[in-house]
């Protein structure tokens, strides 16, 4: 099982994120590629919505596309959360880091808003 890890001293790539823990998660190249591909598709959908607004598309047509983006983001979140539970949370519990469960609960609360 892969562990999440704190920022390495060798890595200067700080991800700007308000409220982030700044922990990192090592992913296989396939895992990373799959997640990035999902996000690229979502990004394309959002650009399409922007184009629809610029071309004065009908409101309902835009809203249908917005619903599709929301569904895609929810699907992305489910995949990421599932992987997080199977790897990071499981390993932290085995390592005795029970505070990870509290972190997970707070994350699920945010996802369910």
Image (cartoon, rainbow, N blue to C red):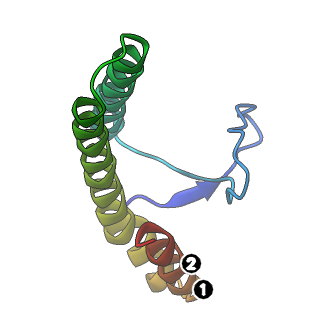
**Dot 1: few (<14), some (14–19), or many (≥20) neighbours within 10 Å?**
few
User: 22 and 39: which one is in front?
Assistant: 39
Is 83 positioned to the left or the right of 94 in the image?
Answer: left
Is 38 positioned to the left or the right of 25 in the image?
Answer: left
Give the residue number, with chain letter if any, for mark 1.
Answer: 99
Placement of 33 over or under 77, stated as above or below: above
User: 88 and 65: which one is in front?
Assistant: 65
x and y percentages locating residue 71 in the rendered image = 25, 49
Residue at x 32% of width, y 47% of height: 70
**Quarter placement of the C terminus:** bottom left
Is 23 positioned to the left or the right of 60 in the image?
Answer: right
x and y percentages locating residue 54 in the rendered image = 43, 13
- Give yes or no for contact between labels 1 and 2 (Cβ–Cβ under 8 Å): yes
Residue at x 50% of width, y 85% of height: 101
Give the residue number, with chain letter if any, for mark 2.
Answer: 103
**Secondary structure category for the residue under label 2:** helix
Residue at x 27% of width, y 25% of height: 58
Placement of 80 over or under 107, stated as above or below: above
């Amino acid at each position: 099982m892969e562990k999440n890890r704190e920022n390495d001293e060798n890595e200067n790539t700080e991800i700007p994120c308000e409220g982030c823990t700044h922990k990192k998660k090592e992913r296989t190249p396939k895992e990373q590629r799959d997640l990035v591909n999902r996000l690229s598709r979502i990004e394309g959908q959002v650009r399409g919505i922007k184009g629809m607004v610029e071309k004065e598309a009908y409101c309902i047509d835009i809203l249908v596309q917005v619903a599709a983006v929301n569904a895609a983001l929810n699907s992305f979140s489910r995949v990421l959360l599932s992987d997080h539970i199977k790897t990071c949370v499981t390993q932290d519990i085995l390592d005795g880091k029970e505070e990870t469960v509290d972190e997970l609960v707070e994350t699920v609360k945010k996802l369910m808003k």
